[in-house]
Amino acid sequence: MILFLLPSLYLILAEGLIQIQLRLLAYPKTAIVTIATQVILVAALIINLNPHQHTSQEMKPVLSYLQTHQQAKDRVYLYHWAEPAFRYYAADYQFSYDDCHLITPIPKNEYTKEFDYFRGKRGLKPTDVSETQCILGVSESFHQSQPDLEKLRQHGRVWVIFSHIVESEKMLFLKYLDNLGERLDEFHQPGSFVYLYQL
């Protein structure tokens, strides 16, 4: 809504500056200061109209890294909130969201989430870790995800993808995974991360 109000705001601002300029024209020094102020204001507006593009969760480079470093028998574990971005970009990197499965039952949630729709649409039921190469994280909470992580033990190389996660929560996951196995590799992008573990 603010976007639509900006033209009116610019017109009011311009009219106000012109009125100030007309009143102060009798004083040459003041007129110069006023014109300089107007030029600075216009320049600031132009700069702010073209802000630098900001990206906060770079999943594409993470998937590209995974695609080039993943071995045939490696498993991929998707942190709960990494699922939407993975689902959107997966096909571009020769991954398939339809090949991803749950390995533990979904905990009862008070609110319906976007995940519930897509998981329900596929009729997802928990499967055994040995039957899937791509695992969907059951929850964004570390404590509810512990059964997932525990089931990964003794299943070789596992890539763990995080996105849209609070740093403190990510550290809980990583600390637990570091205790389960050995961290072999990692790749970081703004807001998205992938870690390789030998579990």
Image (spheres, grey):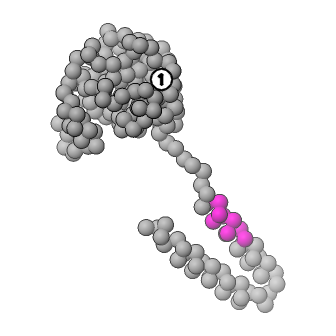
Instruction: Give the image quarter of residue 198.
Output: top left
Secondary structure of the residue carrying tag 1 is: helix
| Residue 55 coordinates in the image, percent (x, y) | 52, 44
Q: Quadrant of the N terminus?
A: bottom left
Instruction: Give the image quarter of residue 22.
Output: bottom right
In the shown orientation, is residue 4 left or right of residue 18? Answer: left
Q: Does the magenta stretch include residue 42?
A: yes
Number of dots carrying numbers: 1
| Residue 10 coordinates in the image, percent (x, y) | 58, 75
In the displayed structure, would residue 126 be above or below residue 38? above
The residue sitting at 65% across, 60% down in the picture is: 47
Secondary structure, magenta segment, majority class: helix
| The one of 188 and 144 positioned closer to us in this rendering | 188
In the shown orientation, is residue 123 left or right of residue 26? Answer: left
The residue sitting at 30% across, 29% down in the picture is: 98
The residue sitting at 45% across, 32% down in the picture is: 92
The residue sitting at 43% across, 35% down in the picture is: 89
Q: Can residue 151 be seen in this view?
A: no
Neighbours of disc 1 within 10 Å: few (<14), some (14-19), many (20+): few
Specify the amino acid type for callout 1: Gln
Q: In which quarter of the image is the C terminus?
A: top left
Q: Does the magenta stretch include residue 119?
A: no
| Residue 170 coordinates in the image, percent (x, y) | 40, 30
| Residue 40 coordinates in the image, percent (x, y) | 71, 68
Q: Which residues are the magenta region? A: 39-48
In the displayed structure, would residue 95 be above or below residue 21? above
Q: Is residue 113 visible?
A: yes
In the displayed structure, would residue 7 be above or below residue 67? below
Q: Which residue lies furthest to the right in this view?
A: 28
Query: Which residue is under mark 1?
Result: 67
